[in-house]
Image: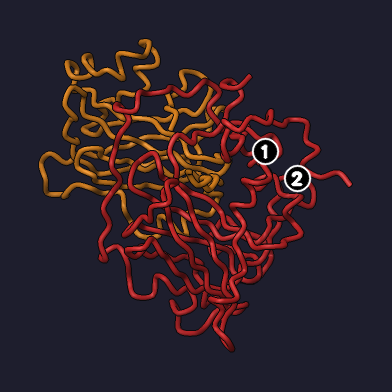
């Protein structure tokens, strides 16, 4: 069976590329008119430093961390706990940084006017959360497991189940937006967004770990997703590497 | 031993339900006489406004931060005051650009058109040719400052490795 790994555009196996994505990965069609065609300009580090914003508790409302308690009733779907740590690539925890998530509901539908997938909206689910990391870099959300959904990128295109994450970190250059996936998803091998990360080991970093220890008996399964923010991780563009 | 970085993934088309559901595009007091509207359009390689994009501006000195989603025409809008300059540099905002189709955000800068002397002495602007430099300086427009971001095509905006 043909899979996305058969795509002819594969970067050389060069560890200096790091775990970053191939920005113009052709399997993801929307990249075509949006990715810069000219080489990125490299700045000396001292010209480049910018400390990140400082966040206080005023950034957070009471039930921002619990997506199952933001409405009058409970959302439908499988209740889950998603937690982990935000770390620098030297292993130091990043405290008091803003973590934002957004996701589809259990039926695979986003509460967004552009999403016309004929799956039901859930009046008790907005699909958005935020929290600050604690002094050890820990974050924790309660939500429901998102559904897969079709997205029209190619015939019979379906996204694996995922939760979007946005994380700040201490410096401008550590800002990260990513997606957390669930272990064992049968859609991984067909998903070009996942496969735009060309290194299979790096793709593993996007998959959460089922966490039996954090699972709460009679209440919710738990998944662990640690996030490592690094520097110098610019994605690859064809002009830089050809 | 450094840990492997978590790879970037696109914000996708529906980021607005999570990232811009609360307005966060003003980092100036509306009554402040120094407050200025910063507007612009995020434009793709076919000259079309990117309707599912998001722009963040970071003040590298004041550590202020704001974000604006784009509208159906790719337009974004902020209310700002000019950042202080780092010593030896012209005042600027760092700018992060996100959208569907961008697997990782891009980094650029906004410089101010009324800072002619400081811009001429800025070491980053000085390292660029004239056409590239011009893509990083805003324009005065009806009392606001306009800064368009062109991802590709004719006179594309300069983006920095990050």
Q: Are marks 2 and 1 in contact (CB under 8 Å)?
A: yes
Callout 1: SS? helix
Residue at 62 percent across and 69 percent down: it is: A210
> Of the residues under marks 2 and 1, which one precedes in the sequence?
1
Query: Badge 1 sits on which subunit?
Result: A
Residue A29's disc is 1
Q: How many marks?
A: 2
The chain to which mark 2 is attached is A
The residues bearing labels 2 and 1 have C-alpha atoms spaced at a distance of: 8 Å
Give the numbered dot on residue B102.
none
State the hue of chain B: orange
Write the residue at 45% across / 61% down. Answer: A85
| Chain that is red in the image | A
Residue A108, above or below B148? below
Q: Give me the residue at 51% from left, 43% from top.
A: B99
Q: Position of residue B151 (x, y in %)?
A: 49, 29
Neighbourhood count class around disc 1 (C-alpha, 10 Å): few under 14, some 14–19, many 20 upward: some
Residue sitting farthest toward the bottom: A218
In the rendered image, the vertical position of residue B8 relative to residue B130, given as above or below: below
Which residue is found at the position 52% from the left and 20% from the top? A38
- Residue A144, by quadrant, is bottom right
Residue A154 tag number: 2
């Amino acid at each position: 069976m043909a899979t996305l790994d058969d795509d002819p555009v594969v970067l050389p196996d060069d560890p200096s590329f790091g775990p970053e994505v191939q920005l113009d990965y052709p399997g993801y069609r929307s990249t075509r008119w949006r990715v810069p065609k000219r080489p990125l300009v490299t700045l000396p580090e001292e010209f480049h430093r910018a400390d990140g914003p400082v966040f206080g508790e005023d950034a957070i409302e009471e039930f921002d961390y619990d997506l199952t308690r933001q409405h009058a009733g409970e959302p439908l779907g499988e209740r889950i706990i998603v937690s982990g740590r935000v770390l620098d690539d030297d292993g130091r925890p990043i405290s008091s940084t803003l973590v934002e998530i957004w996701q589809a509901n259990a039926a695979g539908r986003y509460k967004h006017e552009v999403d016309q997938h004929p799956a039901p909206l859930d009046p008790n689910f907005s699909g958005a959360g935020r929290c600050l990391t604690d002094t050890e870099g820990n974050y924790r959300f309660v939500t429901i497991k998102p559904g897969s959904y079709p997205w029209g990128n190619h015939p019979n295109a379906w996204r694996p189940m995922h939760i979007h994450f946005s994380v700040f970190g201490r410096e401008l250059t550590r800002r990260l937006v990513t997606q957390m996936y669930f272990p064992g998803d049968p859609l991984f091998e067909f998903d070009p967004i996942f496969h735009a990360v060309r290194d299979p080991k790096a793709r593993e970093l996007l998959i959460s770990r089922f966490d039996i220890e954090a699972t709460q008996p009679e209440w919710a399964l738990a998944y662990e997703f640690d996030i490592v923010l690094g520097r110098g991780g610019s994605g690859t563009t064809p002009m830089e590497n050809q | 031993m450094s840990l492997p970085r978590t790879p970037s993934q696109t914000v996708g088309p529906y980021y607005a339900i999570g990232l811009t559901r609360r307005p966060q595009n003003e980092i100036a007091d509306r009554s402040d006489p120094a407050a200025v509207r910063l507007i612009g359009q995020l434009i793709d390689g076919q000259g079309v406004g990117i309707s599912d994009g998001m722009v963040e501006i970071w003040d590298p000195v004041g550590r202020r931060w704001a974000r604006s989603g784009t509208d159906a025409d790719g337009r974004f809008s902020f209310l700002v005051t000019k950042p202080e300059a780092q010593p030896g540099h012209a005042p600027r905002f760092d700018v992060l650009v996100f959208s569907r189709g961008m697997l990782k955000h891009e980094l650029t800068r906004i410089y101010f058109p009324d800072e002619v002397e400081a811009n001429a002495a800025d070491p980053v602007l000085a390292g660029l040719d004239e056409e590239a430099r011009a893509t990083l300086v805003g324009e005065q427009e009806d009392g606001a400052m306009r800064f368009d971001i062109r991802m590709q095509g004719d006179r594309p905006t300069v983006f920095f490795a990050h």
